[in-house]
Amino acid sequence: VQQNNYSTFYDDQRQNWSIMFESEKAAMDFSKQVCIAKCNSSPALDSVLCQDLLLGEGQGVEGGDSLEIAYTGWLFQNNGLGQVFDSNVNKDKLLRLKLGSGKVIKGWEEGMMGMKKGGRRYLIIPPAWAYGAQGVAGRVPPDSTLVFEVEVKRVKLVKESSGSDGQSVSSRDSPAPSPVPNSDGFSAD
């Protein structure tokens, strides 16, 4: 995925190709289909598949950085998107999380590394990296592969913050990430 609705790729002969799309939406839709095709063509999905939809700006996030994200999660069924099981897109509250804190499924921790503010990414997460054999009662059946579209709305990089030790301790001690957006130290949208 490139800026201005471009995508580039190599074919099996190592020849580079570029595609330009009519719109940002067309480019994102194509990228989602590429990710689903990668999933369907792999014999066994044993790691998280990541496909950038929009690159975003600034520095890529790493472990310890705090993010506020909008997301939608689908069950992966019949080789494609099944029903939505979770989303905060049409809600007032963004999900706030600190990468590496272990408060979200392992597939998110892995799949969001390197994302930038304003970036959007498609994640296909195998059961072992999600909710595994137990699933989530009433929402995620056991051994489900999940698909997420995530968008980073705000970022607070560890390297940027000064004297935020108290804040990082309090967020690490809380039982779950607070979904309430807190603008302290986050760059504006």
Image (cartoon, rainbow, N blue to C red):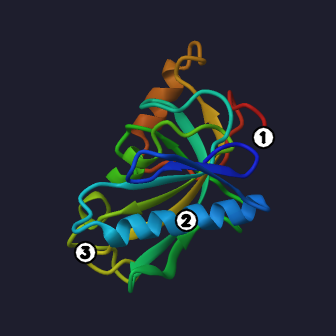
Query: What amino acid is found at the position of numbered circle 1 in the picture?
Result: Asp
Mark 2: secondary structure: helix
- Say left or right for 78 vs 155: left
Front-most of residues 105 and 8:
8
Q: Is residue 33 above or below residue 110?
A: below
Disc 3 and disc 1: Cα gap in Å? 37 Å
Q: Which mark is residue 189?
A: 1
Can residue 99 be seen? yes
Which residue bears the numbered disc 3? 143
Q: Report crowding for label 2: few under 14, some 14 to 19, many 20 or more residues within 10 A (C-alpha).
A: many
Which type of secondary structure does the marked residue at label 3 adopt?
loop
Q: Is residue 188 left or right of residue 76?
A: right
In the rendered structure, are the residues bearing label 3 and label 1 in contact, judged by CB atoms less than 8 Å apart?
Answer: no
If the image is split into quadrants, where does the C terminus sit? top right
In the rendered image, residue 68, in percent from the top left (x then y), is placed at: 61, 45
Determine the image quadrant of residue 23: bottom right
Q: Furthest-bottom residue in view?
A: 78
**Left or right relative to 5: residue 116:** left
Identify the amino acid type marked 2: Lys
Q: Residue 32: give its label.
A: 2
- Residue toward you, 115 or 43: 43
138 horizontally vs 82: left or right: left
Instruction: State the image coordinates of residue 187 (x, y, percent, origin top left).
Output: 73, 31
Tell me the mark number nearer the camera, choosing from 2 and 3. Answer: 2
Q: Amino acid at mark 3?
A: Asp
Q: Is residue 88 visible?
A: no
Dot placed on the residue nearer the N-terminal end, 3 or 1: 3
Within 10 Å of the Cα at label 1, are there few (<14), some (14-19), or many (20+) other Cα atoms?
few
* Mark 3, other Cα within 10 Å: few <14 / some 14–19 / many ≥20: some
Which residue lies at the image location 44% right of the left edge and 29% below the top edge?
64
